[in-house]
Image (spheres, coloured by chain):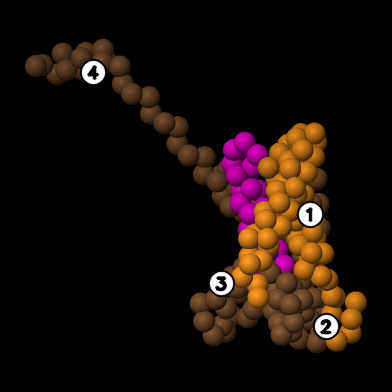
Chain colours: A orange, B brown
Amino acid sequence: MNGLHGLVLTHFQAFLLFAAVISVAFGFLGRRQPKDRVKYILWSFFLFLLVGVGIGWAMYPFSR
Amino acid sequence: MSEETSQAVQEAVPQPEVAPAPKAPREGLALGLAVAAWILPGLGHALQRMWGRALVVFVGVGLLVVVGVSMRGNIFVSRGNDAFDTLGYLADLGTGSFYFVARGMERGGTDVSHANGDYGTRFLATAGVLNLLAALHAYEAARGRKA
């Protein structure tokens, strides 16, 4: 926590937090059985990471 | 064709089944639950005894709002300058009562001159859209759709 800038997270930390919260919410809303929920949450989280990192790498050549 | 014959023909021909009238009370209840879910995240599911979903929606939306405000994200107001401000306001308003909690928590104002403030703005908008999705889910569950 920084008094001037408030809570400071790196881009990757914010990305992980976002992916985790949304994956859990999607898992609970989209599936009924606990086992299905866990599978859905893990899969959704993994896809968030994959797509996020993939888009990051795709933009890398244009970043400078 | 006489009247009796006409009636006999009508009885003999199979009539298409009339669809049952929509259940107005259930529809009204579902709408009420959707509004409740919008006003207080998770309430729509809690009233249907879906405790796990209610808790996840409440904590998820609340966490996104608290983190978004803590990162000094922009909480849009109704007097927007352009269409993007209006869209941002609608997204933020999706959090229902948490919008006013966020306004109350805002101490140092927004700061989108740094990346963190910009991330915070996205967290706040995501919280609103997630709550609207949850309210839609509560509505569908109340209507008896598979949920």
Q: Mark 4 points at which residue?
A: B10
Q: What residue type is labelled 2?
A: His
**Cβ–Cβ under 8 Å for marks 1 and 3:** no
- Pointer 2 local density, CA inside 10 Å: few below 14, some 14–19, many at least 20: some
Q: Position of residue A45 (x, y in %)?
A: 75, 49
From this viewpoint, is residue B103 visible? no
| Residue numbers of the magenta segment | B123-147
Which comes sooner in the sequence, label 1 or label 2?
Answer: 2
Q: Indicate the quadrant where residue A13 lies.
A: bottom right
Task: Determine which residue is flagged by label 3.
Answer: B87
Q: Where is residue B131 in the image (x, y as percent from the top left)?
A: 68, 59
Q: Is mark 3 on a helix, strand or loop?
A: helix
- Whole-number angstrom distance, CA of label 2 to CA of label 3: 25 Å
Left or right placement of residue B58 versus residue B4 in this view: right
Crowding at label 1, few (<14), some or many (≥20) Cα neighbours within 10 Å? many
Q: What residue type is labelled 1?
A: Ala
- Element type at mark 1: helix
